[in-house]
Amino acid sequence: MSTCTHEWQMANVRFGLIAFEKCFHCGSVRTYFSSEDSLPLGDEYREGDHFWSRVETAQSFRFDLQCTRCGLIEGFGELMGLMHCTGCLEDCPVEQQRRVLERQRTWLVVAFGFLPQALTSPLPERKLAVLTEFFNQRRDTSRSTIKVVPFNLIPDLSRCAGEFLHDVGMLSQEPPAERKPLFS
Amino acid sequence: MTTQDLIDKLQLKPLSTFEQREVKGVFISDMVSDVMANARSGDLWLTVQTHKSIVPAANLVDVAAVVITGGKEVPEETVQLASKFGIPILWAPMSTFALAGKLYELGLRTP
């Protein structure tokens, strides 16, 4: 068991695209990371019983966290992205937690794993705690703090209008349209 | 140097409500993913992006302020969200390049 008080910094940063695909047959959503320069929207293909269509792509990045003291690396390859809760659903446990935490000047961030894998194996609590620790280590915590919570607190993704901290529309010369909820 | 010093010296227009912050450096990018990966707490973030998603990214990294350059109009929902988080949104009529030059003249550097 390590006795190191870890001090985290980002390591192995890889920029790329997150693709959101939806099956127009069953409504399932799946996401993946690609290092391709572009992934055109609207591409459709069949895979087994699914008819996948790419509904959104966003520029993003993957990273690991490395302790500057002991060298330990925590991999975050399964982290699809971080989402800002917009408070869209009053009965959502994330929103209820957000309201309580914000009174203490703690800002809540929702961590998503890649779908559908993350539905059955979400990011472990230990990794969420490491992420929380990392974001708080690099800010002035006398003013406010960050707490990272898992996306599986959201009871119904299809009703979630949270916003991912991704870059959408950066590959287009056209101004970005208003973003739509990705899961509904 | 504080956000108020920069507002006074460079005639930046504050749009949101916030507490004064110390400015430690400058980060220039129009991508929130770049900011999340590379900006530092206390940085002044110069961007032409005005979508409200810049606010949670700025908050996550704990930047000292976001400066919208090039005289771009900032949506009210971006300003409101920034006020909620206490993130300074400053508006500059000059280009990112011109503002970066003035910040350099004032002694600000990227660590």
Image (cartoon, rainbow, N blue to C red):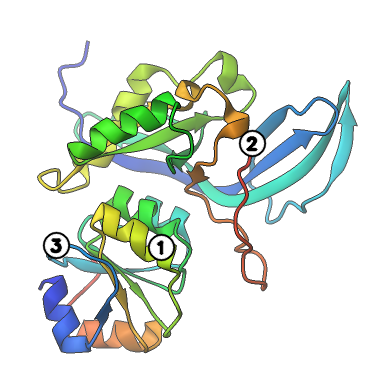
Quadrant that contains the N terminus of chain A: top left
Q: Chain of mark 3?
A: B
Tell me what residue is drawn at x 66 percent, y 37 percent. Answer: A184
Q: Residue furthest front?
A: A90
Exactly how many numbered labels are in the figure? Answer: 3
Disc ID at residue A172: none
Q: Which secondary structure, mark 1?
A: helix
Q: Which secondary structure, mark 3?
A: loop
Instruction: Answer above or below: position of B107 versus A129.
Output: below
Residue flagged by tag 3: what amino acid is it? Glu
Disc ID at residue B78: 1
- Other residues around mark 1 within 10 Å, as few (<14) / some (14–19) / many (≥20): some
Q: In terms of sequence position, does the residue under pointer 1 or pointer 3 come before the other?
A: 3
- Where in the figure is residue A68, as x and y percent of width and height? 23, 37
Q: Quadrant of residue B81?
A: bottom left
Instruction: Answer above or below: position of B52 versus B47.
Output: above
- Where in the figure is residue A42, as x and y percent of width and height? 82, 49
Q: Do the residues at discs 1 and 3 belong to one chain?
A: yes
Q: Quadrant of residue A38?
A: bottom right
Residue flagged by tag 1: what amino acid is it? Thr
Q: Which residue is mark 3?
A: B19
Residue flagged by tag 2: what amino acid is it? Phe
- Where in the figure is residue A60, as x and y percent of width and height? 53, 49
- Other residues around mark 2 within 10 Å, as few (<14) / some (14–19) / many (≥20): some
Q: Which secondary structure, mark 2?
A: loop
Tell me what residue is drawn at x 45 percent, y 26 percent. Answer: A91
Horizontal relation, residue A177 to residue B36: left or right: right
Q: Which residue is mark 2?
A: A183
Q: Do the residues at discs 2 and 3 belong to one chain?
A: no
